[in-house]
Image: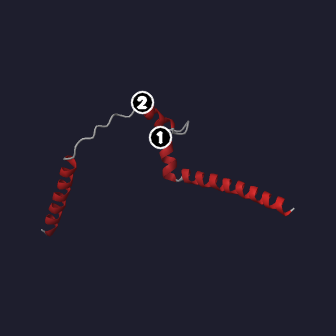
Amino acid sequence: MKRMKRIGGAAQVLFAALLAAGCSEKSERSPPSPAATNAAVTNMPAGKSTMQTFIEGATGKTAVDAERAAQDKIRKISAEHNKDLDEVQQ
C-alpha cells in the first residue's frame, strides 16, 4: 500500500512538471536554413556512413585514433625541442 502511494505521488509530480512545461509561450523559431543543414552534413568525414561513425565511437576507435595523433604530435614537438637544444649547446 505504501508503494502505491509513493508511485501515485511521483506520478502527480511528473504530471505537474509536464503541465507547467506545456504552459509556456511558444517561441517563434524559423526552421534551419538549407545551408546550415548542408553544413552539418558536410562535417561528417568523407566515405564514412553514420553507422560506421557510430560504431567507431562506441568501440573506442575514435579515441584511440585521437590518442595516436596526439602522441605523434608530441613526438614531433619533442624532436623539434631536442633539435633546438642541440643547436644551443653547440
Q: How many marks?
A: 2
Q: Is residue 2 above or below residue 63?
A: below
Quadrant position of the C terminus in the picture? bottom right
Observer-nearest of 26 and 12: 26
Instruction: Report the mark closest to the observer, 1 or 2.
Output: 2
State whether residue 90 is above or below residue 73: below
Q: Residues within 10 Å of mark 2 (few under 14, many from 20)?
A: few
> Looking at this rendering, what residue extends furthest in the top direction?
34
Q: Could you tell me how far apart the alpha carbons at marks 1 and 2 are, in whole angstroms?
A: 20 Å
- Amino acid type of the residue that numbered disc 2 sits on in the rendered structure: Pro
Which residue lies under the disc numbered 2? 34
Q: Earlier in the sequence, mark 1 or mark 2?
A: 2
Asked if residue 72 lies left or right of residue 85, the reply is left
Residue receiving disc 1: 50
Q: Residue at x 79, y 57 (%)?
A: 83
Q: Residue furthest left?
A: 1
Q: Residue furthest front?
A: 88
Quarter containing the N terminus: bottom left
Horizontally, is 42 left or right of 20 in the view? right
Residue 76 coordinates in the image, percent (x, y): 71, 54
Q: Is 18 placed above or below 37 here?
A: below
Residue found 51% across the figure and 52% down from its top: 59
Q: Residue furthest bottom?
A: 2
| 23 sits to left or right of 71 | left
The picture places residue 20, in percent across and down from the top left corner, at 19, 51
Residue occupying image coordinates x 18% and y 59%: 13
Q: Nearer the viewer, residue 50 or 89?
A: 89
Q: Of 51 and 74, which appears nearest the observer? A: 74
* Residue at image point 50% right, 38% down: 49
Q: In terms of image quadrants, where is residue 12?
A: bottom left
